[in-house]
Amino acid sequence: MDNQRRLIRLDSSDFLQIQPVNEVGEIYEAEAQDFTFMGICFCSSIEWKKGQVLALNYFIPEDNEPVKMKMVVIWSEFISSSQGYFCGGQITDIEEKSQAQFAHYYYKKLKEKFSQ
């Protein structure tokens, strides 16, 4: 299979709050596994459907305010009863006031990865 990733994915274990867009309901918690400017992979106890749009609060360590963004689910695969589902999605929108915060975090993680 052709790898279509254009950006370097960076490992993380950052806390996420997830809520389906246009649905009144519960806010779910998950842990990011990796991310880029374009997408996020995370583990969740919930099965998210391909094409579903999610609102995320991405909590960057050492920052007081989460990065608010939206993503569309590209895939969701059941891993195990203890891990739940492994999901991947494309970021479609980052709140304007959070864009620099998220870009700085990505750059910081890149520096950490390649300066070791």
Image: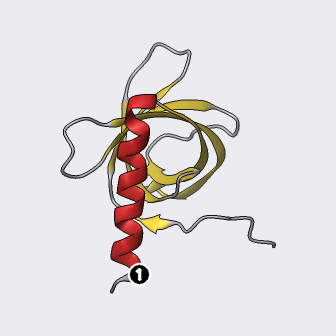
Q: Is residue 95 left or right of residue 104?
A: right
Depth check: give the residue in front, 56 or 68: 68
Residue 41: image x %, image y %?
Answer: 52, 55
Q: Quadrant of the N terminus?
A: bottom right
Depth check: give the residue in front, 101 or 53: 101
- Which corner quadrant of the image does residue 83 belong to? bottom left
Q: Residue at x 18, y 50 (%)?
A: 62
Task: Name the kind of residue labelled 1 in the image.
Answer: Phe
Q: Residue furthest right?
A: 1
Figure check: 113 above or below 86: below
Residue position for label 1: 114
Q: Quadrant of the C terminus?
A: bottom left
Q: Residue furthest bottom?
A: 116
Residue 20: image x %, image y %?
Answer: 52, 26
Q: Residue at x 52, y 66 (%)?
A: 9
Q: Count every numbered label the image shows and give the total.
A: 1
Depth check: give the residue in front, 77 or 89: 89
* Residue 25 appears in the figure: yes
* Residue 30 appears in the figure: no
Figure check: 71 above or below 3: above
Q: Is residue 73 left or right of residue 27?
A: right
